[in-house]
């Protein structure tokens, strides 16, 4: 038997063991054909089909006698953990035990963690006896004249900036995206980093990070924040929002100079002093918090600003120990931060810069009480005495209400249409019945692995934790190296799964919505919505895990009318908005769904939102690309609003259910526990 035949046999055996039943008509078509063109009428009521053994796409058009004959070599993923290929048919051991440590060997996986030695950009010189020696400053150093800037540390630079993934492809195309900044006296955007008002150390770190041009959101945000204004910014996924808030804040920190107070905040009535950061970033998920923290380390390099991160699922004692070594910029999830405040370990009295990243997600996850407590009921300075920034790719109206309470005379910045998807992502929607989903998924994974010449990672989203485990097991049992991430896995397991995925050891990650937001993983080439989410904003964030920073990516959604009719209208709008191909059957499904909903008396989209998730207009989701202050009383401090929480729905958009009574968080907090 020659090698090729052996490969094909191996592939055949793998698929033969699937226990996945392909339908009769599926076996005679290509991947695309069998899923994308059902007639709308036929789609909901598929005839009973005879089940047969799964036949991979490359063999489908051959007569049965040839189906076991030579075919393409077994697919492989290039770029395994040590740069070598990882064959699909390789080991089933998907544990990332010996994965490389891009962080230079910190404890606790790729995310490191406060307990894993001192990995802080600003902290390495403050280390105790076990740390490396301080790096003396070269007299020719460009910062030789600045006592607040430390010497260079090549090892640290390698750790922080070693693996740059910004390809720069299409990056300039961002300049075509329409930008709107509303609010009075919005400052002019910067043109480039070099000529901006950023502190010189910030500029130097930007260069080290490999950022040559600012993205549109960065151009505006740098100008707005350095001019001292509050900001609410909406920009597409992957468009550089993290640096858009970290850079100007750190730059302001550098300009402000080392504060004239002890790094740990001073008096605490005989107890250990409280940690008292000057910048606080709140993020919804642990993984996102870690990611922001890692970015902060890049931009804080050589400075006195020491970033720290705190999130649940990790021993509090380690985090406290790390905080006590000094913390000027704290990235935290709201729950853990409240715990630390309750234990008297953190004071917010010195906060000058407050950021809420993915604020809408935090509300959806039920964090509104914690956020309001942190911002309004502890010792944080009032909005006029701090700068507050809110960032997200989507901005439902309830978030605008939060902005009204937290922000002061802010600029509302939209880059592109709010909630739109990047045109760098090619989106496809395939009609797939529930029973066929696994089989179609295998087709897609198989064809990706044969077509792609580079290390492409695939992220598969499902709705429930249980389904994530089951699908992951299914893929593993078919020799597709996969791992999973969801809320029932321990933090360590979650971090290991991400590390394993990032390093392409397991190039398929099955995830619930816990991985939908903010995660920035290079080389995610394909996002598959195995289950479409019930909220279209989640769709936008999920597919935004690919096509980031000007790179291209693709997204495939499995749609069927039985399950997904609630999102069909908004999905269609998103496709049109991003100039994507809209299958005719999808439009027919929309009509069918609308007919059914009007028959049942639905007011609009699901979850009690009586209409669009933006603007509350009840119409198009893109009707709400507006600063709501425009329609409700103009700008200026507080925009002329009273500060009371809203009682009922907003403009008819939120009165129907989950968002009534100002309790947006509670209506969906359970879903966080059960689903993610
Ligand atoms: N000016 C820039 N030049 C080159 N790369 C950049 C620039 N700004 C950001 N990036 C890179 O782009 C990627 C995406 O950035 P980031 O994670 O901040 O996006 P985002 O807008 O926050 O996305 P999401 O909405 O999904 O959270 C990151 O890898 C980041 O390092």
Image (cartoon, grey):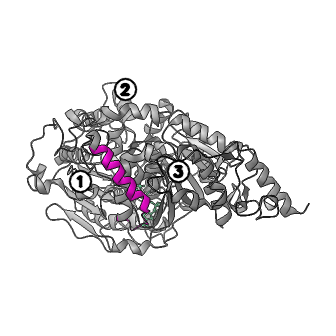
Q: Which residue is mark 1?
A: 619
Instruction: Check if mark 3's residue and mark 1's residue have beta carbons within 8 Å.
Output: no
Nearer the observer, 448 or 359 = 448
Residue 39 visible somewhere in the drawing? yes
Residue stretch in magenta: 577-598
- Residue 101's spot in the image, x, y percent? 63, 50
| Residue, far front | 47
Helix, strand or loop at mark 1: loop
Nearer the observer, 66 or 664 = 66
Name which residue lies at 44% across and 43% down.
Answer: 563
Helix, strand or loop at mark 2: loop
Quadrant housing residue 376: top left
- 3 or 2: tag closer to the N-terminus: 2
Magenta-highlighted stretch: main secondary structure?
Answer: helix
Nearer the observer, 355 or 274 = 355
- Find the distance from the CA under tag 3 to the CA under tag 2: 51 Å
Helix, strand or loop at mark 3: loop
- Find the distance from the CA under tag 1 to the CA under tag 2: 47 Å
Dot 1 alpha-carbon crowd within 10 angstroms: few under 14, some 14 to 19, many 20 or more: some
Dot 2 alpha-carbon crowd within 10 angstroms: few under 14, some 14 to 19, many 20 or more: few
Q: Which residue is mark 3?
A: 432
- 1 or 2: tag closer to the N-terminus: 2
Q: Which residue is mark 2?
A: 343
Please identify, in this view, whether the residue under mark 3 or under mark 1 is nearer the observer. Answer: 3
Q: Is residue 561 magenta?
A: no
Name which residue lies at 39% across and 39% down.
Answer: 333
- Ligand 1 resides in the quarter of the picture at bottom left
89 left or right of 350 in image: right
Residue 106's mark? none
């Amino acid at each position: 038997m020659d090698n090729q035949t052996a490969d094909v046999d191996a592939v055949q055996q793998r698929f033969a063991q699937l226990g996945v039943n392909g339908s009769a008509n599926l076996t005679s078509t290509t991947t695309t054909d069998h899923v994308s063109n059902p007639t709308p009428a036929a789609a909901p009521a598929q005839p009973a089909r005879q089940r047969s053994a799964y036949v991979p796409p490359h063999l489908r058009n051959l007569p049965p006698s040839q189906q076991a004959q030579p075919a393409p070599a077994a697919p492989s993923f290039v770029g395994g953990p040590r740069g070598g290929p990882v064959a699909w048919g390789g080991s089933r051991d998907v544990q990332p035990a010996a994965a490389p440590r891009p962080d230079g060997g910190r404890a606790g996986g790729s995310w490191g963690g406060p307990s894993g030695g001192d990995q802080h950009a600003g902290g390495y010189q403050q280390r105790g006896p076990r740390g490396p020696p301080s790096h003396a400053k070269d007299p020719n150093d460009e910062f030789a004249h600045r006592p607040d800037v430390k010497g260079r540390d090549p090892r640290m630079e390698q750790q922080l900036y070693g693996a740059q993934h910004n390809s720069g492809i299409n990056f300039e195309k961002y300049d075509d995206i329409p930008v709107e900044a509303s609010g009075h006296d919005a400052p002019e955007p910067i043109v480039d980093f070099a000529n901006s008002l950023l502190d010189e150390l910030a500029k130097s770190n930007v260069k080290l990070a490999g950022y040559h041009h600012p993205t549109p959101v960065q151009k505006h945000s740098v100008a707005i924040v350095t001019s001292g204004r509050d900001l609410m910014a909406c920009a597409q996924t992957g468009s550089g929002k993290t640096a858009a808030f970290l850079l100007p804040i750190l730059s302001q920190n550098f300009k402000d100079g080392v504060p004239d107070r002890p790094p740990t905040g001073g008096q605490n009535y005989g107890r250990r002093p409280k940690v008292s950061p000057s910048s606080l970033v709140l993020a919804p998920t642990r993984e996102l918090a870690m990611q922001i923290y890692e970015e902060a380390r890049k931009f804080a390099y050589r400075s006195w600003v020491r970033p720290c991160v705190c999130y649940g699922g990790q021993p509090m004692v380690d985090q406290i120990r790390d905080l006590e070594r000094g913390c000027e910029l704290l990235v935290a999830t709201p729950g853990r931060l409240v715990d630390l405040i309750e234990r008297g370990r953190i004071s917010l009295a010195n906060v000058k810069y407050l950021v809420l990243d993915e604020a809408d997600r935090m509300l959806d996850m039920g964090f509104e009480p914690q956020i309001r407590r942190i911002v309004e009921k502890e010792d944080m300075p009032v909005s006029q005495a701090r700068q507050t920034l809110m960032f997200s790719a989507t901005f439902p109206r309830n978030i605008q209400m939060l902005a009204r309470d937290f922000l002061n005379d802010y600029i509302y910045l939209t880059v592109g249409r709010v909630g739109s998807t990047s045109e760098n992502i090619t989106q496809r929607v395939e009609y797939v019945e529930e029973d066929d989903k696994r089989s179609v998924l295998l087709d897609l994974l198989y064809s990706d692995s044969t077509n792609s010449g580079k290390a492409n990672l695939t992220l598969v989203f499902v709705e429930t934790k249980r389904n994530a485990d089951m699908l992951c097991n299914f893929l593993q049992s078919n020799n597709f190296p996969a791992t999973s991430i969801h809320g029932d896995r321990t933090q360590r397991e979650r971090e290991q799964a991400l590390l394993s995925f990032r390093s392409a050891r397991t190039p398929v990650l099955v995830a619930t919505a816990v991985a939908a937001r903010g995660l920035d993983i290079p080389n995610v080439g394909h996002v598959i919505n195995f289950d479409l989410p019930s909220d279209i904003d989640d769709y936008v964030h999920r597919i935004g895990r690919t096509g980031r920073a000007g790179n291209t990516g693709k997204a495939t959604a499995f749609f069927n009318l039985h399950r997904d009719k609630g999102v069909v209208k908004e999905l269609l709008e998103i496709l049109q908005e991003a100039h994507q191909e809209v299958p005719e059957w999808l439009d027919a499904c929309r009509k069918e769904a609308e007919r059914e909903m009007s028959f049942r008396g639905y007011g609009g989209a699901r979850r009690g939102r009586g209409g669009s998730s933006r603007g509350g207009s009840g119409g198009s989701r893109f009707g709400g690309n507006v600063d709501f202050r425009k329609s409700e009383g103009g700008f200026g401090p507080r925009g002329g609003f009273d500060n009371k929480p809203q009682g009922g729905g907003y403009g008819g958009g939120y009165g129907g259910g989950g968002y009534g009574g100002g309790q947006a968080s509670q209506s969906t907090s359970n879903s966080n526990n059960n689903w993610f």
